[in-house]
């Protein structure tokens, strides 16, 4: 469990760059085009098809707009026919990309392999800009026009080698980019939504009173809901927090039959609406099954998590030691959670609780740019490659953070990654990018 609340190094709040992927058969000029877009004269291009390049993602810019450029030419899953390989590459690219540049060599024309890629691109429904490459002079313009047949719209004649037409093509790419960032970050300027949860008698309403003081503003959560939960807006630190369903905390139903079931429904509903959960635990008593269940609910809901050990004023040395052992044994799984020890009764460390909520939310919203992620994983994997199994060594081809709130990563690998290796990668990601207080998800897609 991370002791509270050091500054984390992370790209928090950073608006993610849109991603542009360059796909196409080997030798059509993808790499030359990438170098052209990056503005590098000394194109690092090999004349051997399918040469594995060491980097796949670059920071690029055109007409003042920054984006991440993916060169899929570097991914070369072995042991397959060429058509299968490039469709696999296209599938990876469309997962990661906002816009795809599909490169076709006009001196060859559209091949069966090109048609196969077109089918993948169509299915994905992502915007595609068709680059008709190797139009080095006006005589080949007509060959470019023939590519209308692919059904991907206007072919943009370019010469990646000489630069001809690449500006117009990039204008088309920018026009196809989403206007706003893929995810709305508006919510983050409003009050942050927090669910204060925990089994009965742990001190929820005491803590709420301590936090709110005179300041609370009662607001209806969602008009017209049957359970009619009521939230409270409370200013803490330098921002406002919306405490979800405080009516459920303040109104006591514990005598009623079915109370526990009802309480856990309410907890689940509050977690759905929350961004960060504060799970309050009575530290003076042994950890209970119900405490663990509530923590699992937070994890499953994918919310940022702060565990607050309350009633710290009641603890003697013996109980403190026992608690640490209980935490080591039973909560190791959520060792990423923020931890604070508090006393709702005296107000001790309640300020730290607020800082922990802030930190957990930072981790929860963190976005790692694709280029940075792949550069980092490249280093990690070359220092600690996956163990060889049955003569094979799975390689990581490419990774992207598909989502935040909570952070979700998709890794494309050439073979199955063992659970221990995935945990290792998760650990390194946490060390590097600071996901304190947030669950992160790492899924692996295997491309043989
Ligand atoms: P990739 O395998 O798709 O990345 O293709 P490369 O960028 O490695 O290019 C393959 C070959 O095509 C290289 O010899 C390049 O010099 C050549 N090439 C790339 N673009 C052009 C172009 O616009 N015109 C001509 N004539 N050749 C090109
Ligand atoms: P809830 O059911 O989770 O809302 O818990 P309450 O806030 O009603 O608290 C249950 C009991 O624990 C009350 O008698 C509180 O006074 C007491 N309590 C809450 N927080 C603390 C604390 O930090 N220290 C001590 N000693 N007692 C506390």
Image (spheres, rainbow, N blue to C red):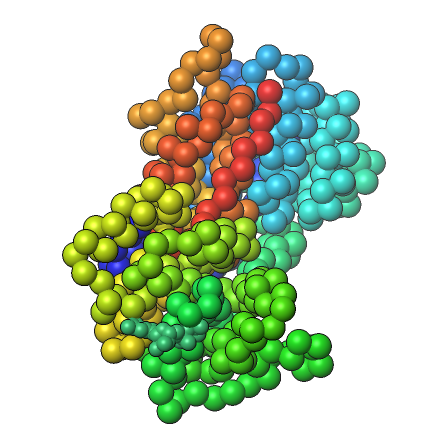
Q: Where is residue 386? Give x, y as percent.
A: 41, 22
- The image quadrant in which ligand 2 is located: bottom left
Residue at the (37%, 62%) spot, across then down: 281
Q: Does 141 sit left or right of 307 as displayed?
A: right
- Which residue is the extreme one toward the left? 317
Residue at the (27%, 45%) spot, across then down: 325
Residue at the (66%, 37%) spot, across then down: 102
Tally the numbered discs.
Answer: 0
- Which residue is the extreme one toward the bottom? 214
Q: Where is residue 201? Give x, y as percent.
A: 42, 70
Q: Where is residue 390? Give x, y as percent.
A: 49, 9
Q: Does 38 sit left or right of 358 as displayed?
A: right
Q: Where is residue 265? Give x, y as percent.
A: 61, 64
Front position in the image: 241 or 48 = 241
Front position in the image: 440 or 391 = 440
Q: Quarter-wise, where is residue 100 in the image? A: top right
Residue at the (68%, 21%) spot, across then down: 84
- Which residue is the extreme one toward the top? 391
Q: Is residue 48 above or below residue 373?
A: above
């Amino acid at each position: 469990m991370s002791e509270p609340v050091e500054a984390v190094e992370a790209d928090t709040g950073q608006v993610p760059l849109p991603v542009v992927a360059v796909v196409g058969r080997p030798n059509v000029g993808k790499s030359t085009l990438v170098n052209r877009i990056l503005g590098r004269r000394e194109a690092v291009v090999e004349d051997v098809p399918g040469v594995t390049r060491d980097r796949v993602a670059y920071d690029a810019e055109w007409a003042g707009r920054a984006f991440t450029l993916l060169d899929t030419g570097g991914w070369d899953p072995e042991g397959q026919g060429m058509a299968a390989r490039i469709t696999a590459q296209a599938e990876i690219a469309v997962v990661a990309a906002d816009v795809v540049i599909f490169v076709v060599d006009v001196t060859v024309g559209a091949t069966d392999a090109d048609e196969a890629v077109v089918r993948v691109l169509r299915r994905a429904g992502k915007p595609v800009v068709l680059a008709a490459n190797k139009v080095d002079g006006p005589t080949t313009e007509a060959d470019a026009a023939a590519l209308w047949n692919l059904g991907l719209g206007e072919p943009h004649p370019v010469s990646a080698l000489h630069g001809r037409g690449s500006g117009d093509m990039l204008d088309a790419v920018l026009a196809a980019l989403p206007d706003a960032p893929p995810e709305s970050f508006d919510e983050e300027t409003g009050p942050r939504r927090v669910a204060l949860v925990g089994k009965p008698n742990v001190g929820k309403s005491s803590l709420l009173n301590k936090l709110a003081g005179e300041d609370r503003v009662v607001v209806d959560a969602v008009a017209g809901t049957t359970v009619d939960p009521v939230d409270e807006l409370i200013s803490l630190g330098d921002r406002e927090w919306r405490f979800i369903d405080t009516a459920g905390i303040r109104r006591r139903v514990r005598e009623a039959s079915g109370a526990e079931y009802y309480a856990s429904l309410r907890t689940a509903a509050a977690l759905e609406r929350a961004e960060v959960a504060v799970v309050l635990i009575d530290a003076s008593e042994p950890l209970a099954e119900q405490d663990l269940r509530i923590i699992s609910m937070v994890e499953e809901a994918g919310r940022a998590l702060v565990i607050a050990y309350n009633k710290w004023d009641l603890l003697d040395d013996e109980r403190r030691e026992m608690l640490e052992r209980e935490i080591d044994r039973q909560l190791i799984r959520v060792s990423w959670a923020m931890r604070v020890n508090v006393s709702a009764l005296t107000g001790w460390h309640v300020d730290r609780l607020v800082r922990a909520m802030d930190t957990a939310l930072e981790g929860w919203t963190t976005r790692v740019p694709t280029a940075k992620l792949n550069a980092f994983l490249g280093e990690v994997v070359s220092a600690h490659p996956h163990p060889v199994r049955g003569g094979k060594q799975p390689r990581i081809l490419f990774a992207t953070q598909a989502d935040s709130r909570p952070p979700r990563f998709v890794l494309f690998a050439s073979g199955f990654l063992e659970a221990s290796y995935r945990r290792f990668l998760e650990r390194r990601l946490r060390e590097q990018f600071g996901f304190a207080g947030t669950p992160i998800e790492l899924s692996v897609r295997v491309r043989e």
